[in-house]
Image (spheres, rainbow, N blue to C red):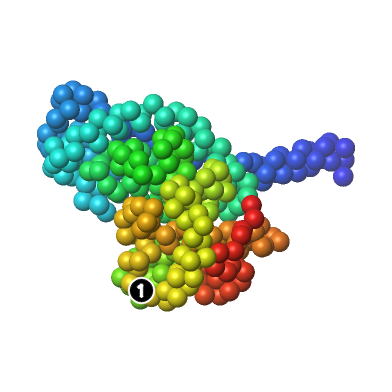
Amino acid sequence: MTLRLAAFALCLSASLSAAGAATPAAPQILTEDVDRFFHLYDGAGGHPTAEQLDNDYLTPGSAGLHEIAKLRSVTGARIVANIAAHPEVYAEARTCLSVLPAVKLRLVSAFAKLSALYPDARNPPVTFVIGRGRPVGITDPSGVTMGLEALCSADFMDPNVEDRFVHTIAHEYGHIQQSAEQQALEPDTPQATVLTMSLMEGAGEFTAELISGGVGNYQHAAWTKGREKEIETAFLRDVDKTDLSAWMYNGVGDTAHPGDLGYWVGYRIIKAYYTRAHDKRQALREIYAMRDPKAFLAKSGWTPGMKIGG
């Protein structure tokens, strides 16, 4: 090989290596729908019509807005009805606009950490929208869509609004990494046992803590303190049930009767599994591609009330 060819080969090899090691493009974090909503809302003195919302907000909206509108029946008429019933939700949502720049910066950092820990990570966009007061968010393979007004008013969660946004969205981004089978799980189906659904949601909580420093359901830490073994012993008795009402999607609750404790128990099982694993990258693959929840539980080493390291 001539010196010129050798030099060319060396340069080509270096270029290919650099390309292979390139950091994945940062996910888009989109707020245009929120901007357009408030432009319309302000112009109408806080009382836009259903026709205005349909034509000037929903129709020209992002793919994320169209997806949440389709899946959760968000229409101009339903937004108008919710503004009339709960005007404070939309007034309060405006106060949350101020945290979005900081939220964006922290999410970029969190998603970069996920890609470093888990190179197979998918990085679709996060889209903020304004809806009919619920849901807080949805995920599908095309991305995460968050209802800013719903998340802003969820003050039973982390009282620090910026933290609430970051940790909740990081939770949803954990769902993006899960297998299509896990993402497709729905309550009231034979596969949707207490264990399966708790591990599915627990993976979101664990991802949030891993990449953003905190879980989405901030309130669980105080509500479960000192009751870990009692709660988790009861959970273990119910793992095969398809009646989720004692553990999942059962409301906010309070200190005496906490809601959604399956999220918390599932998070602790997932964390036990990851903490125990020698190969952390492989552990994340197994968490996100989980096929056999019972086998996963057995391998995790989790027992009711156990202390789980960082």
Which quadrant does the N terminus fall into?
Answer: top right
Left or right of 2, for residue 271: left
- Look at mark 1 in the image and give the residue it sits on: 242
Callout 1: few (<14), some (14-19), or many (20+) C-alpha neighbours within 10 Å?
Answer: some
Q: Is residue 273 above or below residue 212?
A: below
81 left or right of 124 in image = left
Q: Residue at x 30, y 33 (%)?
A: 93
Give the answer, above or below, for where 171 lies relative to 60: below
Which image quadrant for residue 110? Answer: top right
Query: Residue 148's quadrant in the figure?
Result: top left
Q: How many marks?
A: 1
Residue 232, x across and y down, in percent:
49, 66
Local SS, label 1: loop
Residue 36 location (% of width, % of height): 27, 30
Q: Residue at x 47, y 43 (%)?
A: 167
Q: Residue at x 63, y 46 (%)?
A: 116
Could you tell me if residue 302 is visible in this image?
A: yes
Does residue 55 appear in the picture of this structure?
A: no
Position of residue 310 relative to residue 235, above or below, is above
Q: Residue at x 42, y 65 (%)?
A: 197
Residue 297 shown left or right of residue 15 in the figure: left
- The image position of residue 20, as x and y in percent, is 67, 46
Query: How far across and down, in percent of the image, does residue 258 sit?
Result: 38, 56
Q: Amino acid at mark 1?
A: Thr
**As rendered, which of 118 and 24 lies closer to the eye?**
118
